[in-house]
Structures are given as C-alpha cells and as structure tokens.
Image (cartoon, rainbow, N blue to C red):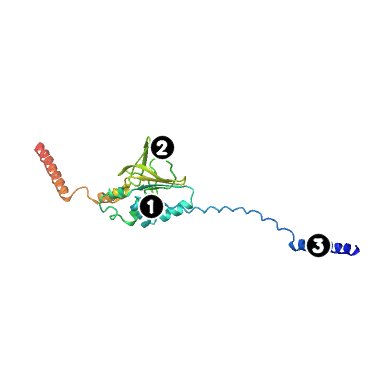
Amino acid sequence: MKQQYVFTTLSFLLLFVLHCSTTLAQGPAAAPAAPTTPVAAAPAPSGPTNVTKILEKAGQFTLFIRLLKSTQVANQLLGQLNNSNNGMTIFAPTDNAFASLKSGTLNSLSDEQKVELVQFHIVPTYLSSTQFQTISNPLRTQAGDSGDGKFPLNITTSGNSVNMTSGLTNTSVSGTIYTDGQLAVYQIDQVLRPMQIFAPRPPAPAPAPAKSKKKKAAVVADSPDETPADNNKAATLQNVALFGVAAVVAAIYL
C-alpha cells in the first residue's frame, strides 16, 4: 500500500514537471500584428503652363506654334506665366487664318516684324469672356504702342459675339481653347495685321530750313537806294529845270 502511494505521488510530480516544461518552452503567444494603413501618394506637382503644348493638344494651330517658337516668344511666355500674377490672354489664329494671307506675306517680314506680329496677338493681362464687355479701347498688346497708326487693337461685343479690329483686320473670337484664371487662349479665324507692319505711315517730310532774317536785313542795308543810271537821270532833269527857270527870268527883264 505504501509503495502504491509513493508511485502515485511520483507519477503526479512527473506529470506536473512535464506540463511546466512544455508551457515554458512555448512562451507567451505573440501579439497579433496591427493592421497597416496604406499611405496616400502625394499629388504630383503641376508643371509650368506651356502655351505651345496647349495649342498642340487643341490642333489646327501649327503655323502659330511655329512662329511662337522661331521668334522665342514661346520661351518668354513660359517665364511670364510662371513668374507673374498678371496673367495672359492669347488670340490664336488657326492654320486656315494664315492660309488666307497673301502668298509670301510671312516670308516678306523681317525677324523683328515677326516678333511684333506674334506679340500683337498677346495681351499681358488675363481677360475672361465676361471682361470683354467692359474693356477699354484701344487694348494694349505686347507689341507696344497702341496709338493710332501703331498697334491699336479695339474690341467690341454684341450679345455673345466678341469682335476685334486692328485697323486692317476685322475678326471675332470663334471659341475658347483654354482658361484657368491666369491664362486664357481664344481662337480667332483671321490673323490680326497691325498697321505698323502692314500699312506703315510714311515719315513726315523734314521741315524747310528757316531763312535768316538777319542776313536778309544786312543785304538790304548794303544795297544802294538808287542805281548810277537813276542818279544821272535825276541830275539831268534838275539841270533842265534850272535852265528853264533862268530863261523865264531873262525874258521878263528883257
């Protein structure tokens, strides 16, 4: 009986030791991993406003794009649009507009005139479609002087129609290509021909040199009042008169 008790006790102790060993070996259960929250990608920074890319996407502005690039005006616009708060408005003639020009017109222009022609289609401020109704004429473009005979551009509205004239070209806005509050690009169906390039006024004639009054007075002062012939004639008449008087006196006394 005693042996059975000892055996039972030892078996219990053995089972207890084995249980503790197994529990220690396993260790504490690992905590479940926390769910990860996906991080939203930062929006890509918007690139600089590029007028030529806008026109390329719109199509039918190949010749105007070529002029913008060849005159370097495209690079100027890129710098102005991304370093100024004034904005910009561009009136873009279509390829058909250039095709309607007289053959050889563009080739006859100097490099400076080509720059002025492109700049005449650019207004250095942002103009929305509603602002055309309250605009002050003549509108100044990047070509410069808006005075009569130079680079005047006048804009009028009639209902929803926006009409413009350069003095030589009459056209209207036929559509909005792009607008973002800083840049506005409008389509026109005629090339705006500035008077300074296509109808320059002839230079004013040089004023005639003023005559010197002092010199004229000197000539008059140096000139004799009478010529020698006039003097001789006067002396002869005087002698005749004296002779006649003497003859009358002699006749009285005789």
- Residue at 44%, 54% (x, y): give it: 78
Cα separation, mark 1 vs mark 2, equals: 29 Å
Helix, strand or loop for disc 2 = helix
* Residue holding disc 2: 133
Type of residue at label 3?
Leu
Identify which residue, 83 or 110, lies in the foreground.
Answer: 83
Q: Are marks 1 and 2 in contact (CB under 8 Å)?
A: no
Question: Which amino acid type is marked by label 1?
Answer: Glu
Q: Which mark is residue 165?
A: none
- Residue 243, horizontal then vertical, whole percent: 12, 43
**Disc with the residue nearer the chain's start (3 vs 1):** 3
Residue farthest to the front, as pictured: 1
Can residue 203 be seen in the rendering of this structure?
Answer: no
Instruction: Tell me the element at label 3.
Output: helix
Structural distance between the alpha carbons of marks 3 and 2: 100 Å
Which label is found at residue 15? 3
Secondary structure beneath dot 1 equals helix
Residue where numbered disc 1 is placed: 56
User: x, y (%) of residue 145?
Assistant: 38, 47
